[in-house]
Image: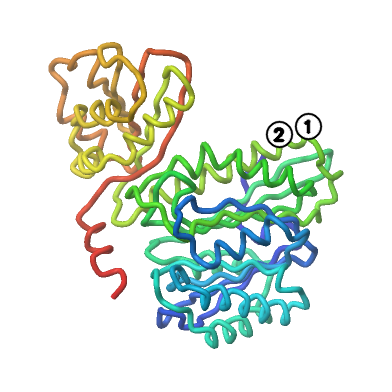
Amino acid sequence: MKIISGGITAPMGFQAASAEARIKYEGRKDMAMIMSTAPCRAAGVYTTNKVKAAPVLWDKEITDNSPNVKAVVINSGIANACTGQEGMEICRDIAEAAGSALHAMPSEILVCSTGVIGMQIPLERMKAGIGALVPALSDSEEAGLQAARAIMTTDTKPKQIAVELSLSGRKVTIGAMCKGSGMIAPNMCTMLAFVTTDAAMEKSLLQKALKDVVEDTFNMVSVDGDTSTNDTLLLLANGEAENPEITEENEEYHAFCNALYYICEQLARQIAADGEGATKLLTVKVKNAASKEAAKTMARSIARSSLVKAAMYGSDANWGRILCAMGYAGVPFDPEKAEVGIESEAGSLLLYNGAPVPDIDEDYATKILKAEEVIVNADCHDGEAGATAWGCDLTYDYVKINADYRS
């Protein structure tokens, strides 16, 4: 596998466009489109929140039942969530407008929205936006980057990645973009994410690959513990690489899954690092736990602890908060056998080893914690399983951003 520049337009046959439709924002692009010149097989994973936005319900029906997909229409600013039957009708109207412009059926058009809950999307502006998007479609790297910018809400930077690998002697490319900064929690987490590939793969295997990869990547991210109404992760495969179609869990399937895992892991890290108001990425590594599930539960507990996150912001080596989060995670471990330490590019330091480590160099600890990425190492000494979760620090700016988000 080789990392390459670009994002969703990197695979063959995929184009993107962005436009200013004034859905909610003024003076910035707020709509994007992803389109494949060849029919795509599509897979999707969605929010576990019982309150699901209209686009989530629309897209799940398509990824579950439609054999092919042509395009995705995305808007930022308004979520089209908690909007009743009118919200579903707007999804259909958007799909019909995009389908008409692209000579596709509405059932081949996916619709994604992000932004304020409870507001109705201005349909005529969306249709005008589609009219601007279609002629602007391009397979250029810049088109992909601008699409990644257009789907941002409180994000401070676009998030994209692309890789190449060889499957059965054919070059296959996977590209991706996502948005996510606040209302981020494990259980799919809060985001819109789009992965494109020119690989040929049977639809059910595509879905399995995506679902399996999510468990240890996007489901291990927490910015603030809130699971959104609009979480959507879509994987589109158009087969343009002309590799022999993958129809079983063979060597090529696992090679593809490894690359997909890398893509999703890197995007998950980007989301955590760009958490609302964040100044640093928090990576939590739990090792030697009794089981994989125990390790995951404990890692998520540490990463989403408000007290741990506040300590990270203050560069305070308050290991008691970390051990406390391990203790209320609800999984068995012996605190007197556990170790807790911190690590960054500035060095590493053991803080707790069944008891407080005496005479900790607080200045050195602060230096470690001031880095852009801080790693918390938690060793349970209770088995052989491990897991990694990602989060960020909790700052004053998080409150400022969310205090007036709607207005």
- Furthest residue in direction front, as rendered: 85
How far apart marks 1 and 2 lie (CA) works out to 6 Å
Residue under the image location 30 percent in, 52 percent down: 278
CB atoms of marks 1 and 2 within 8 Å: yes
> Hey, which quadrant is residue 340 in on the image?
top left
Residue 51, x across and y down, in percent: 44, 59
Residue 176, x across and y down, in percent: 60, 54
Residue 218, x across and y down, in percent: 49, 45
Q: Which mark is residue 254?
A: 2
Q: Is residue 187 above or below residue 100?
A: above
- Image quadrant occupied by the C terminus: bottom left
Residue under the image location 40 percent in, 52 percent down: 227
Question: Is 270 on the left-hand or right-hand side of 110?
Answer: left
Amino acid at dot 1: Asn
What element does badge 1 sit on? loop
Q: Which of 13/346 is in front? A: 13
Residue 275, x across and y down, in percent: 35, 53
What element does badge 2 sit on? helix
Q: How is this picture coloured?
A: rainbow
Q: Which mark is residue 250?
A: 1
